[in-house]
Image (spheres, rainbow, N blue to C red):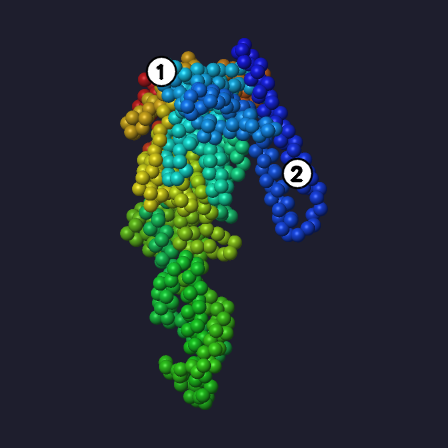
Amino acid sequence: MDNHPELESESKYIKAAYEQVRKLRSSLSSNLQEMYYQEKGGTHQARAERDIVVNTTLERLNHLDFGDLALCFGRIDHEVGPMSNGDRFYLGRIAVADDSMEPLVVDWRAPVAEPFYRATALNPMGLTLRRHFQLDGEDLVSIEDEPLSGGSDTGNDLVGPGALYSAIDKARSGQMGDIVATIQGEQDKIIRSPLSGVLAVQGGPGTGKTAVALHRAAYLLYTHRARLESQRVLVIAPNPIFLKYIERVLPSLGESGVELTTISRMVELDRELRFAEEAESTIKADRRMVRFIEKAVLDRQRPLGSPIEINIGSVTVLITKELSATAVRRAKRRSGTHNERVRIVEMFLSNELATDYIKKSEYYASLDIDEKEKGVPDQAPELDQDEVDQVAEIAREIRSDPAFIKAVNRIWPRLSPEELLDDLYSHSALTKLAARDILTADEISVLNRTYLQGYLSDADLPLLDEALVYLGPFSKRQALPAKYGHIVVDEAQELSYMQSRMIGRRTLSSSVTLVGDLAQSTAPYSVGSWSEIVEPIAISIKEWRYEQLSINYRTPSEILEVANRLYDPTAMGLMPTRAIRSTGVEPIIINCDTTVTQCVIDAIVVMAQELKIGLIGVVIPNHSECDESLIYESIGEALRELSDIKVDVRVFDQSKGLEFDGVIVANPSRLVASNRTRKAAFFTAVTRATKRLSIIVESDEVQTLDSWGIYH
């Protein structure tokens, strides 16, 4: 505990704020109990009103539950002047008022809190002082002051460096925490950007882009509550592991209404998907697949090649090629999805067949037996009014006839997206027809060949989503994608053209925040520019906003220097990031002369003894030969005395976006299958570390790493 002269008075103030929170919790809990004990009867309106009160009370209680996180983390003092009376505001994760409704703590998202994150000595924004608090539970343990009035440029553009470095140096837990107390100026600018339009945020490793994206979601909900509570906010993570890593951040900021998902979970599918090989992924990610899917649907809207007989009692009627062609033309002229227009085909054909049936049956009745054997002429008599009235009833019977249903299914089948792709890939003729003038012969072969390996793959998800747009719901239980008032996408550099279209059709007004790092693009289909990522999301928007984060808070300079040998950001037109800290510990390269599994175990033991506390991440290739169970079993005994060390072994794809105190990268040149993105994968893996880095290399990798500049 420090000896700041105002430590005691500030401690009393903060404890008073905590006491108000407890009082409010108690009052809300009592109200909730009363509502539960009320009689369940009453009018429908009374029950509905009671449910609304209960739900609102539960939401407010959740809002007040932030665990052991600090309620209040800072204070700003305004200068006395024409626009200010020297006001003082305490800032925290939620707003708290005293019994007379005077503010004790201001929500960090309120406009009055902005100078806390933005003010500098050269531009104090009306502040004389910025104060940072560090708490242990409810106890204030230290105060860091930044005088701002009459200041000069010190060359340090960090806000609250003491609190910032303290947060960075904390041991990782495997769960992402919020940065609400240490948001920096360039981050705050992005967080508070306007709601409308598409915002693309380029940030190198360790720049806090994920935290910025999540805090932006919380900020937008606070600022545009009336709109976004009903329209909803969606956060899209790259995979379920990352989703679990970030899931606690928004609740810690008082927001529990944000929906979190992944690209794969955006498509409802009751079947297991196989992993797509590189060639297949690349083809199915291409923008040409939009035309391919559209053509595949159009190809299923086709007249008959030969007539089909439908028997109605003793009378046979025909669905001729000409009649089926007329049905197709009529349906194509009408608006609606493919499945909606099936009804048009059914109604037209059944009415035509019913009319034909009545004409023929009436004509038969007028002939004797010998005449009937001669057949019916092509032109039967016209129907009278009574016969016209019978058409609808007979048409209904025809529509339930199995032969008629089968015929309609040949002309204009009702299809689910899965059925469309199953049919398409399993019949080479259909694939070739849909791909004519769109895909090459080799690409068509890949589509048909990979399907034989196990049906649909993860690369088909965007195509299923695309198909649903053209086909429409297959049944009443299926619906078109939900739309949201704002969408946040993390690791957006990995989006394919087709995945970007998935996101675009889920936004109500093209209000989207994309965060990522082009240098970390490791998908075989990665597009390589933000304009290509944005285009399919907001086709009608000609202008979109672009921001870059320049400060690397996570990666120490020693590790960043290794990473920058792999990629020069300026060569990609990106702003280089600046590390703000150094550990004095250089990365270690381990030449493995035993099994990789044993080398990993040995490296973990050494790193654990150096760190003593924290989380060690082991990054192995996506299709690694490492024995993960043996690693966990071996280190369990070796690290028994180091109970504050945890180890997490992840294949590369599951490590993206995560951070660890120490990182061990095994087989760095083989992390992903694609030769084109292996260097990017290595770059991504090494920058997961906040303190230590070890690289395990087998002899056949030395030449590759030497060409990458790692052995220089």
User: Where's residue 494, x and y in %?
Assistant: 38, 36
250 above or below 315? Answer: above
Q: Residue 176 carries which label?
A: none
17 above or below 371? Answer: above
56 above or below 144? Answer: below
Q: Which mark is residue 153?
A: 1
User: Where's residue 214, x and y in %?
Assistant: 46, 32
Q: Residue at x 42, y 61 (%)?
A: 341
Q: Residue at x 40, y 82 (%)?
A: 382
User: In which quadrant of the rendered image does the C terminus lie?
Assistant: top left
| Element type at mark 1 | loop
Question: The residue under label 1 is which amino acid type?
Answer: Asp
* Foreground residue among 555 and 566: 555
Give the CA separation, mark 2 to mark 1. Answer: 53 Å
- Closer to the N terminus: mark 2 or mark 1? 2
Q: Quadrant of residue 695?
A: top left
User: In which quadrant of the rendered image does the N terminus lie?
Assistant: top right
* Foreground residue among 207 and 558: 207
User: Where's residue 650, x and y in %?
Assistant: 48, 29
